[in-house]
Amino acid sequence: MSTRALPAGLPAKVASVPPNQTLYVTNLPSTKIQKDDLRTALYMLFSTYGAVLDVVALKTTKMRGQAHIVYKDIQTATQAMRSLNGFEFFGRELKISYAKSKSNIIAKLDGTFKPPAASTAAQVEVTDLQQSIFNAPVPGASTTVPSRGLPPKPSGSDQAMPDAGNTESRGTKRPREEEEQKQEEDSDSDVAMEVEDDSDDE
């Protein structure tokens, strides 16, 4: 059984993770900066070494002070890790290593992405009220079981409003000739106003 020699300066935990496009960054400031600002600053810092596909920085209690930087290729990720490990970022030294698993973005690009199973998804508790709503009969269908919700719809067709047949209460439209005369009168008064304004200025 042969033992593999570890590179100098790397802890055993870091050396056991194979190189990949995703970097795991720790020792980030978690209280001084907003999440969006942190993601932008990380993107600006790490994109100087190559194309960054994604920056995942969460502020949950489990992921506070950590981020994942996804590069397009392994060489760029390695170069960024070597250059920025120990770099002072917002007053704290970055600790960078390769991520343990492949990023979802890389898996989607490879075609190896598998969405999480439905069993791992959050289970939703359905209340009795929700069940009664979802299992309610289709509107308009005859049912023999009385519903506990809304009262039944009154029988018969819709009724017209009482004043619907009265034409006198409706608005009347002016004939077209009256509209044209009104517009001419308005335009004449505008011209007269302009003439009066010009004479006052002299």
Image: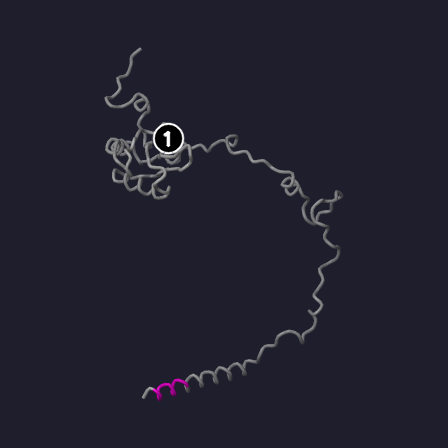
Give the residue at x 45% y 83%.
187
Q: Residue at x 65, y 38 (%)?
A: 128
Assign the N terminus to one quadrant of the image: top left
Residue 76 as seen in the image, left or right of residue 62: left
> Of residues 156 and 87, which is closer to you in this image?
87
Residue type at numbered disc 1: Lys
The magenta segment? 193-200
What predominant SS class does the magenta segment belong to? Answer: helix
Instruction: Return the x and y of residue 46 as percentages of the image width and height.
Output: 28, 38
- Choose between 10 and 48: the one closer to the eye: 10
> Residue 56 lies in magenta, yes or no?
no
Residue placed most toward the observer, 115 or 97: 97
- The residue carrying mark 1 is 102
Where is residue 162? Give x, y as percent.
Answer: 71, 68
> In the picture shown, does residue 37 fall above or below 113?
below
Q: Quadrant of residue 8?
A: top left
